Image (spheres, rainbow, N blue to C red):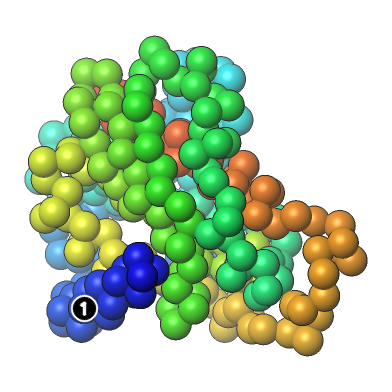
Amino acid sequence: MLKIRFIAYLTIIITFTGFSIANSGIQQKNEFSIAIPDGWVEMPRDVIDAYEKEMANLAPNVPAQHFDYGFQLDETKNWFEHPYILVQIKNMGRIPDSQLEKLAGYSVQDTVKEYKDGLNSVATDIQIGRMIYDKQTKIIWMHIQSNVVYVGPVSGISGMIPTEKGFIQIVGYSLRDDYPKYDPVFRSIILSVAPEPSLVYKPKWSDNLPPVVSGIEWGRVLSKAIGGAIAAAIIASIVGFFKKRKE
């Protein structure tokens, strides 16, 4: 019942955000295109690089992450000031279609618990919902909440788009009080992502083979990969809070 309600909600989001997506600036990136709403800007590469280095110092026990792109509101004064979006391309191998439908049985929350000691100084009470695979849009969704030092309660959403090489993950965060306003924006941006034609996910006959054939338990693998990215994206607001934007 929860899954049905979630997909119905997505349908409403698609209907009512279609206009905003169509009127956003479509940007072609490496391996995909994305529609960014008016009033949002892309983060400079050097800012993201500096964040990744600082993140390693703040939470050395969290697996190092690389983010390919970041976007935030143009009107904000600091980089990584809420709301913001981070994009990560993971070419770690194609996920069989049969495994995508089983992802709801795996908990990313359990993965994040492994990083708890390394995150306590920067974020607490991290809550990650179950993975929900929307077969219509071929997107894996998750909700996230946490309390971040110097910032306060934040909420976010993750959308993972399977490709022929792996997946593209988009994570959007805002202050919790502002989340009802930005949730439709995050969803519209995620829904706008279109992999290059050669990377568009296509079901194959081999998708129905049991995991023992490939030797990969994708649910567990993805829980690890996604959990690390979500934890790293939460820390971003702490690092960026003190970085003034370049004029």
Q: Residue furthest right?
A: 213
Question: What residue is rendered at 11% in x and 41% in y?
Answer: 177
**Position of 168 relative to 239 (above/below):** below
Question: What residue is rendered at 32% in x and 68% in y?
Answer: 6
**Position of 49 relative to 3 (above/below):** above
Quadrant of residue 61 within the rendered picture? top right
* Location of residue 140 in the rendering, given as x and y in whole percent from the top left corner: 48, 64
Q: Of 224 and 237, which appears nearest the observer?
A: 224
* Location of residue 243 in the rendering, given as x and y in whole percent from the top left corner: 26, 25
Q: Mark 1 sits on what residue? A: 12
Instruction: Label 1, secondary structure: give it.
Output: helix
Q: Amino acid at mark 1?
A: Ile
Q: Is residue 207 left or right of residue 147?
A: right
Q: Of 240 and 155, which appears nearest the observer?
A: 155
Question: What residue is rendered at 28% in x and 77% in y?
Answer: 8
Whether residue 196 is visible, yes or no, is yes
Question: What residue is rendered at 27% in x and 19% in y?
Answer: 149
Quadrant of residue 44 within the rendered picture? top left
Label 1 packing within 10 angstroms: few (<14), some (14-19), many (20+): few
**Position of 181 relative to 121 (above/below):** below
Q: Quadrant of the N terminus?
A: bottom left
Q: Residue furthest bottom?
A: 205
Whether residue 44 is visible, yes or no, is no
* Location of residue 138 in the rendering, given as x and y in whole percent from the top left corner: 49, 75
Q: Of 171 and 153, which appears nearest the observer?
A: 153
Q: Quadrant of the C terminus?
A: top left
Q: Of 117 and 74, which appears nearest the observer?
A: 117
Callout count = 1
